[in-house]
């Protein structure tokens, strides 16, 4: 089957994510951990432009340190494009222009957002009309966080984090994030360190079946950041802090300076502070900036990967 290009250029935007709750179970036989996660998509976006090409190529630019982002077939967005081409039997390639705003290896799923954006962009560029369910299947093959970047909003993820169900969230939640000042953290390294810490401290009480605390779902439904702050959790935080002890100071500063809760985002080292409203977020942003930290005010939930221009 051949699919003619239906347009010359597609622009897709996909959000970064925060984990409001992240419980990590024991390591499975296949080496993966079973997790229970509450994700929220936030207003820090990756932008991907797709144009027809004979080959699969990628150019990366952005507002964040791009070190470590592969500009070849290892790039998750290129892998996503190839997957769509393979699925529909498209003979040509695509050129992807990626403009990154989500910190690289920062625990906010930037690579996953690029992959989700590339899936949506190629689907539109090649007129494939694969539909949500099919795109979700392709997303799950690319990585545990890709389906959520496609879906956006607020959701619960189980299994490897990729078995998603939408969660009802009222209103908006205001966050201040502090991107890593230096190098990011590798997600597998953080998981491995968590296993080491659990072994050393003989932590046997790892949940068989991790589950998002019902109180988190209630707080989201009620649109209540104060209640949510009481129940945020991230099992990867101890490992991320142990690998980057310098993060503690910023975490404590944020917590002392009006944040309702402060946490490491996913596998880190980005920090996320939950605030009560936009004004409090702005105040916290000013305080953290005055201390020499980069601080960004974002809000969630926002929609997943979407075409914003043809
Ligand atoms: P997650 O929270 O989903 O584990 P992360 O936000 O910590 O991910 P990413 O920025 O998504 O980390 O990427 C982690 C690694 O993936 C990078 O260090 C890089 O080697 C590789 N990678 C592949 N494609 C991309 C991409 N498009 N953008 C960023 N990194 C990519």
Image (tube, rainbow, N blue to C red):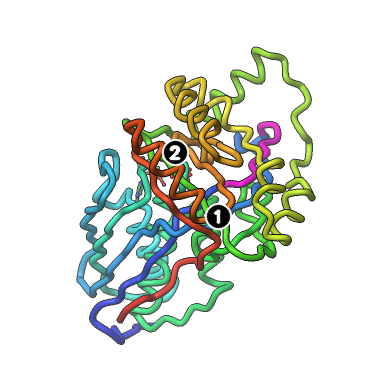
User: Where is the C terminus found, in terms of image quarters?
Assistant: bottom left
**Is the C-beta of the residue carrying label 2 under 8 Å from the nearest atom of ligand 1?**
yes
Report x, y in % for residue 148: 55, 59
Q: Is residue 235 visible?
A: yes
Q: Is residue 264 magenta?
A: no
- Residue found at x 29% / y 83%: 5
Report x, y in % for residue 69: 29, 44
Q: For mark 1, what is the residue?
A: 277
Quarter of the image for residue 222 reads bottom right
Decide: is 194 above or below 153.
above
Magenta region: which residues?
A: 19-27
Query: Mark on residue 133?
Result: none
Looking at marks 1 and 2 on the same chain, the residue that comes earlier in the sequence is marked by 2
- Residue found at x 20% / y 70%: 54
Q: Is residue 166 visible?
A: no
Quarter of the image for residue 155 reads bottom right
**Disc 1 element:** loop
Q: For mark 2, what is the residue?
A: 270
- Residue found at x 39% / y 75%: 307
Decide: is 305 above or below 239.
below
């Amino acid at each position: 089957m051949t699919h003619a290009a239906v347009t010359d250029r597609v622009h897709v935007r996909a959000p970064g994510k925060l984990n409001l709750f992240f419980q990590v179970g024991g390591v499975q036989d296949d080496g993966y951990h079973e997790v229970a996660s509450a994700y929220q998509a936030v207003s820090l976006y990756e932008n991907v432009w797709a144009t027809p090409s004979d080959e699969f190529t990628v150019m990366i630019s952005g507002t964040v340190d791009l070190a470590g982002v592969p500009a070849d077939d290892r790039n998750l967005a290129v892998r996503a494009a190839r997957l769509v081409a393979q699925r529909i039997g498209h003979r040509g390639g695509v050129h992807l222009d990626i403009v990154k705003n989500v910190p690289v290896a920062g625990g906010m799923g930037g690579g996953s957002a690029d992959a989700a954006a590339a899936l949506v962009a190629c689907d539109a560029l090649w007129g494939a009309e694969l539909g949500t369910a099919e795109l979700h299947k392709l997303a799950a093959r690319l990585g545990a966080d890709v389906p959520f970047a496609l879906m956006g909003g607020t959701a619960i993820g189980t299994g490897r984090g990729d078995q998603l169900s939408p969660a009802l969230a009222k209103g908006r939640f205001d966050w201040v994030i502090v991107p890593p000042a230096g190098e990011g953290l590798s997600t597998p390294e953080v998981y491995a360190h968590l296993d080491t810490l659990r072994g050393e401290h003989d932590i046997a009480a790892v949940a068989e079946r991790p589950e998002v605390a019902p109180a988190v779902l209630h707080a989201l439904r009620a649109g209540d950041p104060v209640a949510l702050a009481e129940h945020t959790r991230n099992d990867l935080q101890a490992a991320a802090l142990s690998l980057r002890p310098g993060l503690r100071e910023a975490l404590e500063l944020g917590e002392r300076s009006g944040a309702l809760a402060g946490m490491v985002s996913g596998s880190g080292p980005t920090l996320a502070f939950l605030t009560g409203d936009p004004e409090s977020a702005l105040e916290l942003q000013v305080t953290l900036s005055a201390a020499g930290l980069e601080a960004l005010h974002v809000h969630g939930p926002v929609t997943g990967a979407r075409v914003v221009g043809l």
